[in-house]
Image (spheres, helix red, strand yellow):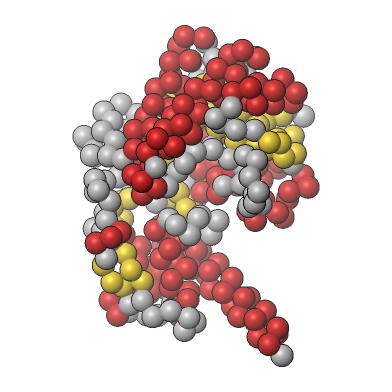
Amino acid sequence: MPTALITGITGQDGSYLAEFLLAQGYKVIGMVRRTSTINFDRIRHFQEDVEIVQGDLLDQMSLISILQEYQPSEVYNLAAQSFVPTSFTQPVLTGEFTALGVTRVLDAIRIVDPTIRFYQASSSEMFGKVQEVPQRESTPFYPRSPYGVAKLYGHWITINYRESYDIFACSGILFNHESPRRGLEFVTHKITNAVARIKLGLDSELRLGNLEARRDWGYAPDYVRAMWLMLQQDTPDDYVVATGETHSVQEFVQEAFGFVDLDWEKYVVQDPKFYRPAEVDLLVGDPAKAGERLGWEPSVSFGELVRLMVQADLEAWERRLKQAAALDQ
């Protein structure tokens, strides 16, 4: 039974990756930070099947100790400060976790066992002010946020450790990937949650920023499969993981409201406070390399993704309303 360590296991990607690896027969170790309130909601339904350990990307000794104790053959570094707007208000903290945290994990691998295979969660936000369309592995980077800059550091330090220490280290340059487990602070889940609440009469408006920003949106479970495939190859490399399609925030809004037969223009208000200081206008990836070398392709379309998320939020709010009604009786 192979052993895999996942940092950020309680996040969207970490939870789906853990489920995927368990299905492949792995022993899964999930690293979480020590806080007074750890949110296990995304992994609660399989929490007994994984081993949760405490560690911190800010504390290299904790990483070394975990590697020494559990001896994983694969490490997936998904932990980060990953919300772009927060990176503008907390740029130093973002750098510590999202940039230097990668170095600490890689150096712990170098010290404990350089044969461990390492996956780094890179991001399409590294392309930022895009230099070509679509974006591929060879596209020059131009990050437009502290998050994008920090991810770029993590990306290049992964390449550096691969070339300097012969570590099997891969970066997945993942474009936006969503699911019902996406955090509510992200625009996609903010939209689908608001649509559900408006449909059920709990809200009357949705305030958003730039509706013209375009993204390449895929389904998160598809993307964690690509992570695993990268570490099963004969040689390490970096891959763009994307659908190859781009859609605007407005298209996402239209699809979500249309699913519940509502006119989005009656409910959506553009609010300048939700605009980024430096906007990323257009992201669309070229997943040809991942398709050719990994045999990977997405399985869920844009429309299916939006409808899946809206349906999940409708069902969640209907359950809450029923529970509240039962308590009132």
**Residue at the extreme bottom:** 329
Report the number of discs: 0
Q: Position of residue 322 (x, y in %)?
A: 65, 81
Q: Position of residue 308 (x, y in %)?
A: 51, 64
Task: Identify which residue is drawn at 54% across, 37% down.
Answer: 78
| In the image: residue 300, left or right of residue 266 | right
Can residue 240 be seen here?
A: no
Q: Residue at x 29, y 35 (%)?
A: 143
Q: Position of residue 75 (x, y in %)?
A: 61, 28
Q: Quadrant of the N terminus?
A: top right
The front one of 283 and 42 is 42
Residue under the image location 30 percent in, 26 percent down: 138
Compared across the picture, whether 119 is left or right of 288 comes to: right
Q: Position of residue 140 (x, y in %)?
A: 26, 28
- 94 or 239: nearer the viewer: 94
Q: Quadrant of residue 4?
A: top right
In the displayed image of the protein, which residue is found farthest to the front? 36
**197, above or below 51, in the image:** below
Residue at 74%, 34% (x, y): give it.
27
Closer to us: 277 or 246: 277
Q: Quadrant of residue 35?
A: top right
Q: Quadrant of the C terminus?
A: bottom right
Eyeballing the image, is 52 above or below 69?
Answer: below
Q: Is residue 325 visible?
A: yes
